[in-house]
């Protein structure tokens, strides 16, 4: 089974590329962003908490994110694998994911990181904010805070997976197809 952590800062293109990877490798896409937006749209208890935190550029608590991920893993009893998009975001979450997967006799095959310069991330997110009307993508200060939080809390995951021999970084700029081909080359190292 091919379980991939798709990694990158907000605006790196994880969602766009995940859709293409799902099609090519027949994986189940577990996007915490999509899950949280669904919770927010349905005005659930999780959604109310998430909306406030995300609106300020902060992370949603592990307890909420982990519960959503575990629910989705249990729903899919025999996939060819999962793409984890937006999770894990911290080393403690990665440790929780490893334990959770182990309970299902699974493991992470590798982490593929999309590398994109910060100014390009900001530009992409502002464009996305205008096109999708996402409030968290329309304010440059909030965007820069999200990127700062990413560097502070999420970047240590690179070392976590690198120490296990499960990390590959790839260029996240260029055409969508060029980025996709780079990702496929990286993923093949874990098959």
Image (tube, rainbow, N blue to C red):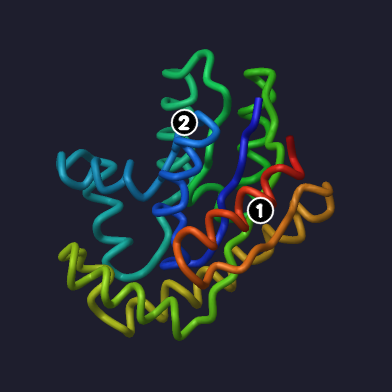
Q: Which mark is residue 91?
A: 1
Q: Measured along the vertical axis of the image, is residue 144 above or below residue 41? A: below
The circle on residue 28 is 2
Q: Is disc 2 surrounded by few (<14), some (14 to 19) or many (20+) residues within 10 Å?
A: many
Residue 150, given in percent of the width and then of the height, sits at 52, 68
Compute the Cα span from label 1 to label 2. Answer: 23 Å
Image quadrant where one finds the C terminus? top right
- Nearest the viewer among 6 and 68 is 6
Please indicate whether residue 46 sits to the left or right of residue 85 in the image: left
Residue 30 occupies quadrant = top left
Q: Quadrant of residue 41?
A: top left
Tag 1 near tag 2, CB within 8 Å: no
Rate crowding at label 1 as few (under 14), some (14 to 19) or many (20 or more) other CA atoms within 10 Å.
some
Say whether residue 121 is left or right of residue 38.
Answer: right
Q: What SS does tag 1 mark?
A: helix
The quadrant the N terminus occupies is top right
Q: Is 140 on the left-hand or right-hand side of 158?
A: left
Mark nearest the camera among 1 and 2 is 2
Vertical placement of residue 101 versus 93, above or below? above
Give the residue drawn at x 67%, y 24%: 106
Q: Is residue 110 above or below residue 138?
A: above
First reached walking from the N terminus: tag 1 or tag 2: 2
Percent x, y of residue 145: 41, 78
Which of the pair 182/107 is nearer the observer?
A: 182
């Amino acid at each position: 089974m091919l379980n991939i952590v798709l990694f990158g800062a907000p605006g790196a293109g994880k969602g766009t590329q995940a859709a293409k990877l799902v099609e090519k490798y027949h994986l189940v896409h577990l996007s915490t962003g999509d899950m949280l937006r669904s919770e927010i749209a349905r005005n659930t208890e999780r959604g109310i908490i998430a909306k406030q935190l995300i609106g300020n550029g902060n992370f949603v608590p592990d307890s909420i994110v982990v519960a959503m991920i575990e629910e989705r893993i249990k729903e899919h009893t025999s996939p060819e694998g999962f793409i984890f998009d937006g999770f894990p975001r911290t080393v403690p979450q990665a440790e929780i994911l490893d334990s959770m997967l182990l309970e299902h006799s699974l493991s992470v095959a590798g982490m593929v990181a999309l590398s994109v310069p910060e100014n390009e991330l900001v530009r992409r997110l502002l464009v996305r904010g205008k096109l999708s009307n996402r409030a968290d993508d329309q304010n440059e200060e909030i965007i820069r805070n999200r990127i700062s939080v990413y560097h502070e809390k999420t970047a240590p995951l690179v070392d976590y997976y690198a120490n296990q021999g499960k990390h590959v970084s790839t260029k996240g700029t260029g055409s969508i197809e060029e980025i996709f081909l780079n990702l496929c080359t990286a993923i093949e190292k874990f098959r």
